[in-house]
């Protein structure tokens, strides 16, 4: 046995054989010992203790031993839930149906993704004319355990070459692999150490990609404040790839996009998750300079398309709900922009296909789609299959038929073919799933938050549900980073509703459902609005007898994990179960880990000012767990390879809760190994995780058996 492995084994044995004195409470669970170290940081004259900072070292033997010991306690507990296996079996059965994505054309082939049912990763197929489809790329063969996933996919202009990225073990660090698409031969052009990158081809010669300097040692030491845009020419070594942008400008996120005709490179650069600069390079002219279009971070502006020298952008500059503008590439400054689709009261998310603009609007978080030509002339409103979320309406200019998806909380995603010249939609693929949407309903309600703001919420459940306050309910939220929660089908949520569960999703401030003003109302010194909106949603469900505190669970991931952590520490009486997933939970130090500093637009940092420090400390979940409080039954979930929201957040929160929890409600942490922030997680692991989450939730609500009788 290797010395490092022996050290871990010794640590596990020591942890398993004794309890921490600080963990003495009335709970019946025997939590592992979590040592406390006298670590103190001074913020503007205030000393803050951080006794579990040692858990931030994700590569130490001691942390590895702690993870093993915590998982042992957690899985021992979960194994005693009588219907855990039944939930897993039902998830597997419901998951096991063929799933097909919308086709897209590259070169002489049509490509599409398909999953036969329980495959860990979707397989990419291709088909020429009416020939039998063939497997083109199968990510399930990338690794033995299925934890290597396919990421970005980009074909050269003629469709003959492909560059695609892969993620190993859920990491945000990627490799870009180059393939001859015709022969499926891998070329000697693999690019390593790539992060937060697109892939955009310059004709058929090479492509642009982005990355940082790869960290040495712990992932926490990664420098993510200096992104670079590189150009890779086929047949050359990565070490010779020139820096196109970012060698002098300090930017956290940089992407390069080449127009469909190959004439222009548009560069977006930003220092946080909101606002970007925009630069232009004319690729049709040799050695042309990079010209600034926007050299500040006051807006979000993105290239949509071009027609010869006319560029089309979507922007929220002077238009919080966004608009489409056009400008000549020779004089692209904002003063010369002309509206093509003006701003409306609804948030705009446009796309292009077949020489048309498709304006996708959110109307109270529900999709509405309108078709325009490039002059801004209104063509038609697209008649959608129902009330829900439509995605797609994006393709090349020459496409005569395009595709879009449609789903909501009770209807699985179906694919529709759309003919832009006629406006006719036809069903392309409807999944054959063992779930009957006709037995369920979704309704949108509006409730009032603490400060009087009206918040929309969609509540989904089985028809005939009696509103007696005893229905197991999951309240799911996010509320941040201008991200919108729109209705969409989930196999896991379908299983929850089969058990008589109610699933409720409010559109909290901090999201993008009502534009930039809605987003900003949940940022920095206004972040408490998000928690107040979530608390008010719970109170609405209780007051209207959908559920009660004994049957309510709150759930959220990443920024939503922060939402759960803050809500349960502020109002532990409000819910029975808390499910924070991969959460941002240490608000004083989040910006010191990996990509965390890029989130400062939404959060602010503890180094900004004493006022900002005090505000963050006032709601930071890790710093607001109090001794003598009975917190809800809590199942924290994270991945040991999460290099976006590092697992230290969850580790420290679990340690604080286990130390201070009063009462018999369990406080457990489930740490998935060889897993990251969620994207690319194998189906098998997802099924196991949700069987545990739902089992834990129902068990702690007092259900002795499943309501469906599985």
Image (cartoon, rainbow, N blue to C red):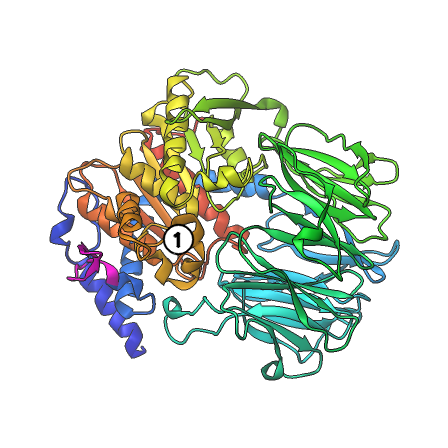
Q: Residue at x 54, y 43 (%)?
A: 92
**Point 58% across, 65% down: residue:** 166
Bin the neighbour count of mark 1 within 10 Å (Cα to Cα): few under 14, some 14-19, many 20 and up. Answer: many
Classify residue 676 as left or right of residue 180.
Answer: left
Which of the image's four quarters has the N terminus? bottom left
Seen at 54% across and 75% down, the residue is: 247
**Foreground residue, 113 or 451?**
451
Horizontal and vertical percent for residue 394? 74, 48
157 versus 74 height, above or below: below
Which element carries disc 1, helix, strand or loop?
A: strand
Q: Is residue 71 visible?
A: no
Q: Is residue 71 left or right of residue 223?
A: left
Position of residue 354 relative to residue 348, above or below, is below
Q: Residue furthest front?
A: 335
**Residue labelled with disc 1:** 638
Specify whether 666 is left or right of 293.
left
Which segment did they paint magenta?
35-53
Give the percent coordinates (x, y) of residue 7: 25, 72
Q: Is residue 44 magenta?
A: yes
């Amino acid at each position: 046995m290797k010395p490092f492995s022996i050290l871990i084994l010794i640590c596990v044995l020591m942890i398993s054989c004794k309890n921490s004195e600080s963990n003495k409470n009335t709970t019946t669970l025997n939590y592992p010992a979590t040592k406390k170290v006298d670590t103190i940081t001074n913020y503007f004259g205030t000393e803050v203790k951080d006794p579990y900072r040692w858990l931030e070292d994700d590569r130490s033997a001691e942390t590895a031993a702690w993870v093993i010991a915590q998982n042992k306690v957690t899985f021992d507990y979960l194994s005693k839930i009588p219907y855990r296996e039944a939930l897993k079996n039902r998830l597997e059965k419901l998951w096991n149906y063929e799933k097909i994505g919308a086709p897209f054309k590259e070169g002489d082939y049509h490509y599409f993704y398909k999953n036969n049912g329980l495959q860990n990763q979707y397989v990419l197929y291709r088909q020429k004319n009416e020939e039998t489809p063939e497997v083109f790329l199968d990510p399930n063969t990338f690794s033995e355990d299925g934890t290597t996933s396919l990421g970005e996919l980009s074909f050269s202009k003629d469709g003959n070459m492909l560059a695609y990225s892969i993620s190993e073990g859920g990491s945000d660090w990627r490799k870009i692999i180059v393939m001859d698409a015709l022969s499926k031969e891998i070329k000697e052009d693999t690019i390593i150490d790539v992060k937060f990158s697109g892939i955009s081809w310059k004709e058929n010669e090479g492509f642009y990609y982005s990355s940082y300097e790869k960290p040495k040692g712990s992932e926490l030491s990664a420098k993510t404040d200096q992104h670079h845009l590189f150009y890779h020419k086929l047949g050359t070594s990565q070490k010779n790839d020139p820096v196109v942008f970012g060698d002098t400008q300090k930017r956290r996120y940089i992407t390069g996009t080449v127009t469909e005709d190959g004439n222009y490179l548009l560069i977006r650069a930003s220092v946080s998750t909101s606002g970007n600069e925009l630069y232009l390079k004319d690729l049709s002219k040799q050695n042309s300079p990079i010209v600034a279009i926007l050299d500040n971070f006051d807006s979000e502006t993105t290239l949509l398309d071009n027609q010869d020298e006319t560029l089309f952008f979507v922007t929220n500059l002077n238009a919080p709900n966004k608009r489409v503008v056009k400008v000549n590439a020779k004089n692209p400054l904002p003063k010369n922009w002309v509206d093509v689709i003006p701003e409306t009261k609804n948030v705009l998310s446009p796309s292009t296909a077949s020489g048309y603009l498709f304006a996708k609007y959110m109307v109270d978080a529900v999709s509405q789609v309108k078709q325009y030509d490039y002059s801004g002339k209104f063509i038609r409103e697209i008649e959608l299959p129902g009330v829900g979320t439509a995605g797609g309406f994006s393709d090349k200019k020459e496409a005569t038929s395009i595709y879009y998806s449609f789903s909501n909380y009770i209807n699985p995603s179906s694919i529709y073919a759309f003919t832009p010249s006629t406006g006719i939609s036809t069903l392309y693929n409807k999944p054959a799933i063992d779930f009957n949407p006709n037995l369920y309903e979704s309704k949108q309600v509006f409730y009032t938050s603490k400060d009087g703001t009206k918040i929309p919420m969609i509540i989904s459940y089985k028809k005939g549900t009696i509103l007696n306050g005893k229905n197991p309910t999951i309240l799911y939220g996010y509320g941040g980073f201008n991200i919108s929660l729109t209705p969409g089908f989930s196999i896991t949520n379908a299983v929850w509703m089969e058990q008589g569960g109610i699933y409720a999703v409010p559109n909290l401030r901090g999201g993008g459902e009502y534009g930039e003003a809605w987003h900003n109302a949940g940022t920095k010194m206004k972040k408490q609005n998000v928690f107040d909106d979530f608390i008010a949603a719970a109170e609405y469900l209780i007051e209207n007898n959908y559920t009660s505190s004994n049957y309510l669970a709150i759930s959220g991931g990443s920024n939503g994990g922060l939402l759960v952590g803050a809500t349960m520490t502020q109002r532990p009486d409000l819910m029975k179960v808390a499910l924070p997933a991969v959460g941002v939970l240490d608000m004083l130090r989040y910006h010191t880990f990996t990509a965390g500093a890029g989130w400062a637009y939404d959060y602010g940092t503890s180094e900004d000012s004493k006022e900002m420090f005090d505000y963050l400390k006032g709601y930071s979940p890790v710093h607001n767990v109090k001794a003598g409080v009975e917190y809800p039954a809590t199942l924290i979930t994270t991945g040991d390879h999460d290099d976006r929201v590092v697992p230290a957040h969850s580790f420290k929160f679990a340690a604080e809760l286990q130390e201070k929890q009063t009462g018999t409600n369990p406080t457990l942490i489930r740490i998935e190994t060889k897993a990251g922030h969620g994207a690319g997680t194998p189906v098998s692991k997802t099924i196991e995780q949700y069987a545990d989450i739902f089992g834990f939730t129902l068990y702690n609500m007092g259900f002795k058996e499943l309501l469906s009788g599985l």
